[in-house]
Image: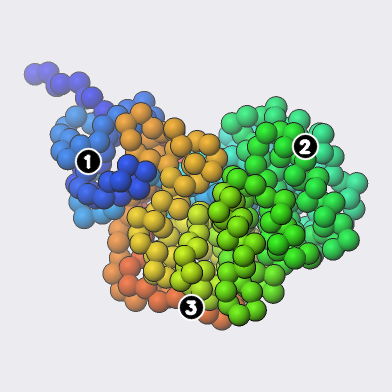
Amino acid sequence: MTTSPTTYDLVLNGGTLLDPAQGINNRRDVAFKDGLVANVAERIDPASGSTSIDVSGKLITPGLIDLHGHFYHGGNSSAVHPDQICLSSGTTTGVDAGSAGSQNYQAMRDYVFPAHRTRLLAFLHIGGVGLALNRLLGGGLHDMRIIDVDHTADAIKDNPGFCFGVKVRMHFNAVAAWNAHAAMKAAREVADKSGTRLMVHVSGTPISLPEVLEYLGPGDISTHAFNGNPESILDGRGKLRPEVRAAADRGVIMDVAHAGVHCDVEVVKASMEQGLLPDTISTDIHNPPPDRTVYLMNDLVSKFHAMGMPLPDAVGAATSRPAQVLGLQDSLGSLAVGMSGDAAVFDQREGRFVWHDMAGHSVNGQVRLDTFLTVRAGAVAWREGRLTQMGEC
């Protein structure tokens, strides 16, 4: 007796595929081969896969993309273990937002990131050693000599596929008000010289938000955009500032980067009511102080859906939109045939769920996405509460 050779490495059968990039929100089976999406159809024979998994009643999405996290595990005290954090939340791509700079990124690139199954990318900090000094000095730009524009631009240019831009923290603990414009100009120069993007932490900026936004152009990222600090996207009457609308209209990306302390529910609601939704949902995941709650990607997608964002829009802000921001839309953010074989499978739990912010506001919802399965490069990387394999770093 002989058995027929299998066509696929993995088949997911019976789920509802929500793929905003393709406009699909319907029952589909998804098959993977050699690390890529090999077939998407209403029915795929389970026997055609070396492994087939019944995901009936569950939601299949492209693997989530966290545009702002801290994944230099072991490189500084705030960074998390990427596989434990990302894969358990349906996140298959994590973007490190400035944990390392031009002087210390090589270990992140050569040793830490390759030790993990999660796809890990980076923005380099404008300061040469990234966030290494934060716990000691409160921020990385107290001495502006730590900035080397040419060296940083060269490091980004020399690492395509790994470095996607430069990050600067406009926070009063990170840079003095009298140095803030110089730091912004340096970061702008790095982005221009490297031909990449500028990501700016805008929560707690020591200069006005309109001044910061003047430095940002199409494709640049205003991260922590929905914070509740005095220099927020809202004016004193709760209206969107005209400079914020102008920035969004010219293509500046409004990124959540929740972090527990950098996203105010009331600011989000007011912004959404006035027509400005987040472009990208991200976590700013890090090792927080004991009194801070930092949500993972699946919880944030659920939270923004509970705040009124249609689920396809919320999933798009965590998949196809960040892929576009990174210029990787041809390989990431969708489960079209030929794309990278990264997927998440969620149970849509029904009940009463509450998400909080650090300003004392809460969001009540009736649906939460709980991760059932994460597929990375066409293979199961997380299932039923356990990693199938992870890095040792």
Residue found at x 64% / y 74%: 235
Q: Secondary structure at mark 1?
A: strand
Q: Which residue is mark 3?
A: 362
Q: In the image, which disc is placed on residue 219?
A: none
Closer to the chain start, of discs 2 and 1, is 1
Q: CA distance from mark 1 to mark 3?
A: 37 Å
Front residue (pair 48, 312): 312
Q: Secondary structure at mark 2?
A: helix
Q: Residues within 10 Å of mark 1 (few under 14, many from 20)?
A: many
Mark in the foreground, 2 or 1: 2
Residue 199, image x, y percentages: 66, 49
Residue 5 position (above or below residue 187):
above
Closer to the chain start, of discs 1 and 3, is 1
Q: Residue furthest top?
A: 2
Residue 106, image x, y percentages: 72, 34
Residue 388 position (above or below residue 271):
above
Side (left or right) of 365 relative to 47: right
Q: Which residue is mark 1?
A: 29
Front residue (pair 149, 70): 149
Side (left or right) of 204 relative to 133: left
Front residue (pair 131, 215): 215
Q: Quadrant of the C terminus?
A: top right
Closer to the chain start, of discs 2 and 3, is 2
Q: Residues within 10 Å of mark 3 (few under 14, many from 20)?
A: some
Q: Which residue is mark 2?
A: 152
